[in-house]
Image (cartoon, rainbow, N blue to C red):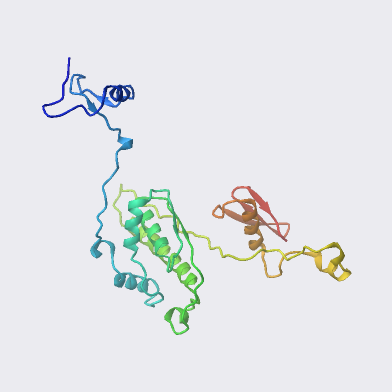
């Protein structure tokens, strides 16, 4: 049959363009194939979800005063950090813009609120998000509660906050699981482990000399070209960086004939530095 546009309207596609849409399965003729042709939009091309509200009320995402009080309770009623971000606020961002396997990077981590929020959300929705926190070791004021409590820089506060928050989340889940009635599956505690890495210079001494610079005394000093203040873990992670291996993989070590042998990521690297 012939189909004409409604009165006052024109076709949205010319004949050539219509033929292209038809060949691409983008024209729909109704359930019975006899309807007015319409342009089809595929679900993969349609925006998913809804646009978030541009105003977030403090009842939903917390505020600075509550965030300070929550952190103070986490640190045995000691005020170790001023104006931390609310965990609820960062968690809202994660809910909107991450999936269950995202890696979340915070280049100005401060008290590590972002790490706390990642673990909290993983505990709620069963996700496996990972976090990378980056923070300069900014020193704390000697008159501050943080300094008196033993936290000499902001990084130490962040590390302790991740430990305490992870333990609190795990404890809460285990407590809730113990109270479940028969037949219900308890929530699984998220992975609360983390690894701390500190930027440093090379592990190696400067051993590059011209041939004429060598002396007998110098040769005696060349038994090892490793700096004296470095340990086997320093050397291990130096190797990982040199070889381009990720720093987040599982690591174990064992004694073999009295020597410590490191195994990284199921035999990707096996090393002994003694």
Q: Residue furthest left?
A: 7
Q: Return the x and y of residue 75 as percentages of the image width and height.
A: 40, 73
Residue 41, picture quadrant: top left
The residue at the far right in this view is: 216
Q: Is residue 81 left or right of residue 52?
A: right
Taking depth in this image into account, of 272 and 92 the one nearest to the observer is 92
Front residue of 118 and 139: 139
User: Which residue is nearer to you in this view: 35 or 225?
Assistant: 35
Q: Is residue 154 left or right of residue 206?
A: left
Q: Is residue 36 above or below residue 261?
A: above
Q: Quadrant of the N terminus?
A: top left
- Please report the residue visible at 34 percent of the width from the left and 58 percent of the height from the top: 91
Q: Is residue 252 above or below residue 213?
A: above
Q: Is there any visible trace of residue 255 in the rendered image?
A: yes
Q: Residue furthest top?
A: 1
**Residue occupying the point 46% across, 81% down:** 141
The x, y position of residue 144, in whole percent, is: 43, 82
User: In the image, residue 9 lies at what x, y percent?
Assistant: 15, 29
In this orientation, does residue 186 appear?
A: no
Is 190 placed above or below 58 here?
Answer: above
The C terminus: image quadrant? bottom right
The residue lying at 34 percent from left, 63 percent from top is: 87
The quadrant in which residue 105 appears is bottom left
- Residue at coordinates 49% horizontally, 70% vertically from top-left? 155
In the figure, is residue 174 to the left or right of 212? Answer: left
How many marks the image carries: the answer is 0
Where is residue 162 drawn, in percent x and y? 44, 65
């Amino acid at each position: 049959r012939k189909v004409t546009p409604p009165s006052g309207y024109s076709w949205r596609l010319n004949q050539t363009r219509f033929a292209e849409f038809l060949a691409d399965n983008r024209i729909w003729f109704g359930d019975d194939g006899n309807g007015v042709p319409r342009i089809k939009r595929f679900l993969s091309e349609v925006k998913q979800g809804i646009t978030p509200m541009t105003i977030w009320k403090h009842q939903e995402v917390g505020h600075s005063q509550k965030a300070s009080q929550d952190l103070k309770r986490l640190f045995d009623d000691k005020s170790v950090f001023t104006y931390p971000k609310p965990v609820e606020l960062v968690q809202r961002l994660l809910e909107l813009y991450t999936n269950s396997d995202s890696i979340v990077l915070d280049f100005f981590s401060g008290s590590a609120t972002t790490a706390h929020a990642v673990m909290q959300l993983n505990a709620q929705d069963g996700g496996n998000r990972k976090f990378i926190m980056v923070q300069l070791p900014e020193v704390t004021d000697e008159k501050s509660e943080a300094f008196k409590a033993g936290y000499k820089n902001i990084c130490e506060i962040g590390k302790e906050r991740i430990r305490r928050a992870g333990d609190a989340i795990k404890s809460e889940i285990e407590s809730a699981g113990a109270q479940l009635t028969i037949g219900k599956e308890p929530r699984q505690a998220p992975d609360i482990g983390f690894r701390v890495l500190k930027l440093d210079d090379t592990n190696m001494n400067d051993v590059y000399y011209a041939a004429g610079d060598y002396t007998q005394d110098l040769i005696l000093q060349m038994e090892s070209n490793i700096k004296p203040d470095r340990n086997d873990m320093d050397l291990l992670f130096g190797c990982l960086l040199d070889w381009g291996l990720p720093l987040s993989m599982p690591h174990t070590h064992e004694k073999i004939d009295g020597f410590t042998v490191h195994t990284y990521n199921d035999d990707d690297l096996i090393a002994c530095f003694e």
